[in-house]
Amino acid sequence: MSWLPVPARRLAVTVVVLAALAAPSILTLWVTTPSASDIQQRVGAATRAHGVVLLGEGDVPPLLAQAVVATEDERFYAHHGIDTIGLGRAFLYDATHSCLCQGGSTITEQLVKDVYLGGSDAGYNKIADIVMAYKVELVIGKQQILADYLSEITTGLNRYGVSEAACDYFHKPLGNLTIGQYALLAGVTQAPSLYDPTIDPNLAAARRSSVLAAMLADKIITPDQAAAANAEPVLTPGPAPTSC
C-alpha cells in the first residue's frame, strides 16, 4: 500500500483493523440473523402491502434483466451475494479520495436491505446485509432474486415495483416495453426521487442514456438501437388505462 497517499494508507490500515475486529461479530451475526428461508414470504408481504405484482422468476423480461444487471451489478450471475471485486474497487476509490464515497452493494444485498433491514444498510446493518445476502443466495436462485428485487423496489415517488411503473409511465404491461423503456426502469431504481420521469423528465432521460451506454458497452444492444432508444419520449402522456 506504499503507493497510496498517507491519508489513504491510514484509512486502509483502519479498515484492516476494523475487519479483524468485525470477524467475531460476523460469526455472531451468522448465528443470530434469520436463515433466509422466509425470503419469499417477506417479499410477498412487501408486495401485498404496496398493492403491486409479485413477479415469478420467469416474469422478468430478458432485456430488463440485462439492463438492471449491466447498470447495478455487473457480476450478479458470478458472485454469491457479495461482490468482492466491487467492494475492493469501491475501497480503492474511497482510499485514494480519502472519503466513503462509493458503495458496493449487490442486487441481493439491496433486496436484503429492503425486506430484512427496514431499508437501511447504515453502520452495523452493512455487515448484517452481507451475511444475509449470502444466506439468501443459499435459499433461492439468481432469477428469483432478480424477480423479487424488481417486484418490491421503489420505482418513483410513492411507487413500487417495475410492473406498476410500466403501467404508470408507459401505459403498457411489463412484457411489452421498448428498449428505452426498459432502460428507464433499470435506471430509476438508483435514485427514485431524482429519476422519476414524472418529476424531472430531463434527469430521467439523462439516466436512461447512461443505462443505454452500459447496455451498449456490454453488447446487449447495437449503436443503432441505443440511438433509437435515446430518441424515445420519456413518458407516454395521459392516464394509465384501468386494464393495465
Image: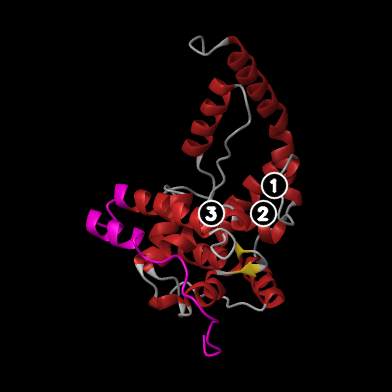
In the rendered image, residue 237, in percent from the top left (x then y), is placed at 49, 76
- Judging by the rendered image, the residue that carries numbered circle 1 is 121
136 sits to left or right of 115: left
- In this picture, which residue range is highlighted in magenta? 216-244
Q: Main secondary structure of the magenta part?
A: loop
Check disc 1 and give the amino acid type.
Asp
- Judging by the rendered image, the residue that carries numbered circle 3 is 107
Is residue 243 highlighted in magenta? yes
In the rendered image, residue 55, in percent from the top left (x then y), is placed at 53, 75
Residue 23 position (above or below residue 220)? above
Q: Closest to the observer: 157 or 199?
A: 199
| Residue plotted at (72% across, 27% down) | 21
Contact between marks 2 and 1 (CB within 8 A): the answer is: yes
202 sits to left or right of 191: left
Q: Closest to the observer: 141 or 102?
A: 102
Check disc 3 and give the amino acid type.
Ile
Q: CA distance from mark 2 to mark 1?
A: 6 Å
SS class, disc 1 = loop
| Residue plotted at (26% across, 60% down) | 225
